[in-house]
Amino acid sequence: MLEASVMQRLGDFTLDASLTVPAEGVTALFGRSGSGKSSLIRLIAGLGVPDSGIIRVGETWLVDTRRRHWMPPHRRRLGVVFQEARLFPHYSVRGNLRYGMPRASRGDFDGLVELLGIGHLLARTPARLSGGEARRVAIGRALLSRPRMLLMDEPLTGLDGARKQELLRYIRQLARDTGVPILFVSHDTREIGALADRVALIEQGQVLASGPVDEMFSRLDLGPRTGRFEAASLIEARIVAHDDAYDLTQLALRNVSTPLDVARLEGVPGDTVRLRLRARDVGVVPASASCSPRSGTAFLPATLREIGDETQGPFVEVMLDVGGQALRARLTRRDVSTMRLHPGQTLQAQVRSVTISRHDVIVL
Ligand SMILES: Nc1ncnc2c1ncn2[C@@H]1O[C@H](COP(=O)(O)OP(=O)(O)OP(=O)(O)O)[C@@H](O)[C@H]1O
């Protein structure tokens, strides 16, 4: 587990943040531009010195300003991957991967090369790699140094849609197969939904909230504080069957018998998927309404958990419980009033599954 509690003044800006990163899985550091994400990750990596504070990984102290202790970056055993891959231009990919590689990593080399899909690139120089390939090599190099943790600062920025999806898949696999915990910086909720197990939200230099990603997505109170954290829910479901004739995949949510159809996915029946549902694509109808399900819209039994406290503007966000999972919906304030909505009420969640794109679904 990494624990950081640091203060640093940077011109007019003050970073005063406490962050805990568990020893496994993927933690996202999320915040708007200028919120202090890079400054915090730089302090953890050892690319800056805090005015005061501590940083430690397990029992190892990386920084403790009271004791004037500051461990230089190369001794921290943290693998750092930035937006730009920073590979050595005159070395081949193999040379880049082996640079500084400890003897103990030799046995990991082939497996990692395969995991990252870079076997066919080993003899190339970095100039002949695409952006996504170069980043995979940089990630491989960082992992071969046997890091305690991998730090990634916006690792997907600048890649096109397909390359981004591909790298997302590799990073997920890494987190699962190598067991190295990952802390990654992002301001993109799609990336976070697809990758993170936990999210820490940073604003004006302070970590405001942190927790499991589905919980953070479903906290109504965080919505207004985070411009780009588009209101959405993360829902787990299972692939039931594919409909090849119509290019659809039928999903079942936990404890819910009504199926949900989405555009054809890659997985096989039985696979678990994580689904990102935007609040604006979810509505409610009374429990008594008889709605004939269509493949583009599903009606799922739901209980109203919480109503947002907006008293102005056209919309209100509400939180529904669907089979034990939190589902966020955006309604008009008028509907909340005319339907006399109240917590505890039984309803049907109307989910426009036709709006769910393949990029909103991750096969876990
Ligand atoms: N060396 C510095 N001197 C003065 N101000 C700085 C310095 N480094 C960062 N800042 C300021 O600190 C604030 C936080 O910057 P930081 O790069 O950590 O934000 P960020 O959340 O990573 O943003 P982005 O998503 O745009 O990369 C910004 O207002 C920035 O201008």
Image: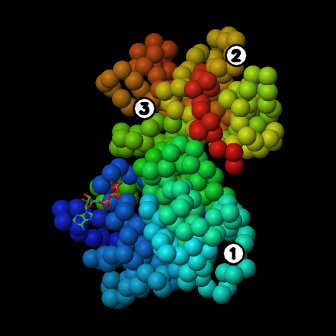
Q: Is residue 280 left or right of residue 171?
A: left
N-terminal-most mark, 3 or 1: 1
> Residue 293: which disc?
2
Mark 3 vs 2: CB contact within 8 A: no
Q: Amino acid at mark 2?
A: Pro
Q: Amino acid at mark 1?
A: Phe
Which residue is nearer to you in this view: 111 or 41?
A: 111
Tell me how far mark 3 sits from mark 2, CA to CA: 28 Å
Pointer 3: residues within 10 angstroms few (<14), some, or many (20+)? Answer: some
Q: Position of residue 210 (x, y in %)?
A: 47, 55
Q: Give the answer, above or below, for where 166 lies relative to 15.
A: above
Q: Which residue is mark 3?
A: 308
Element marked by disc 3: loop
Q: Amino acid at mark 3?
A: Gly
Q: Residue at x 37, y 88 (%)?
A: 69
State the colouring used for the structure image: rainbow
From the viewer's perspective, is the residue at label 1 or at label 2 nearer?
1
Q: Which residue is mark 1?
A: 109
